Image (tube, rainbow, N blue to C red):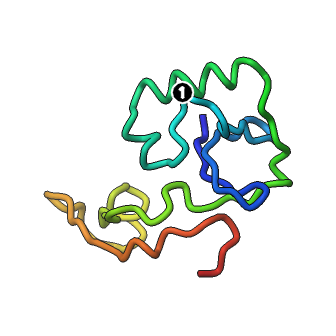
Amino acid sequence: MKLVTFTYNNQMRVGAVINDAVVDSHGSADIPQSMIEFLGAGATALLAIQALIDTGNARIALAEVKLNAPVPRPGKYLGIALNYADHIAETGRDQPEYPSFFTKQSSCVIGYGDAK
């Protein structure tokens, strides 16, 4: 399941991409209407959106929506340096004994096709 935050008819919504469509949770009482709230709801929200997906309803063509940042303006953004073998190899460095974390501004998270 690919969860998304998207804009449709000038409203930001939460949904899931299924093939070439977005399952729109708009108006569903069981599904939180922001991704932060959705993620905070955990398994309950996942089960609710899966039930909506299973109905085959609430579909909008992917071409008709704008995909936003999955989690608009997250509270923090953490990265892990040298976090997979191919990347370590391409840098020519030794595998680190411990992970190295770095932070970025939360504004680094943007929607599909956005320039900034």
Residue nearer the viewer, 27 or 90: 27
Compared across the picture, whether 31 is left or right of 61 comes to: left
Q: At which x and y percent is residue 95?
A: 24, 61
Residue nearer the viewer, 92 or 12: 12
Compared across the picture, whether 115 is left or right of 56 comes to: left
Q: At which x and y percent is residue 51?
A: 62, 19
Q: Please identify the residue farthest to the bottom as the structure is shown.
A: 116
- Looking at the rendered structure, the number of numbered marks drawn on it comes to 1
Residue at image x 85%, y 54%? 63
Q: Relative to 18, does residue 71 appear above or below in the rendering?
A: below
Residue at image x 46%, y 74%? 108
User: Where on the picture, by quarter, is residue 74?
Assistant: bottom left
Tell me the residue that label 1 is attached to. Answer: 30
Q: Please identify the residue farthest to the left as the structure is shown.
A: 97
Q: Relative to 110, does residue 33 appear above or below in the rendering?
A: above
Q: At which x and y percent is residue 73?
A: 44, 66
The local secondary structure at tag 1 comes to: loop
Residue at image x 42%, y 41%? 39
**In which quadrant will I find the N terminus?**
top right
Compared across the picture, whether 19 is left or right of 1 comes to: right
Residue at image x 34%, y 65%? 77
**In which quadrant will I find the C terminus?**
bottom right
Residue nearer the viewer, 4 or 48: 48
Disc 1 residue type? Asp
Compared across the picture, whether 103 is left or right of 84 comes to: left
Q: At which x and y percent is residue 9?
A: 79, 57
Disc 1 residue crowd, few under 14, some 14–19, many 20+, Cα 10 Å: some
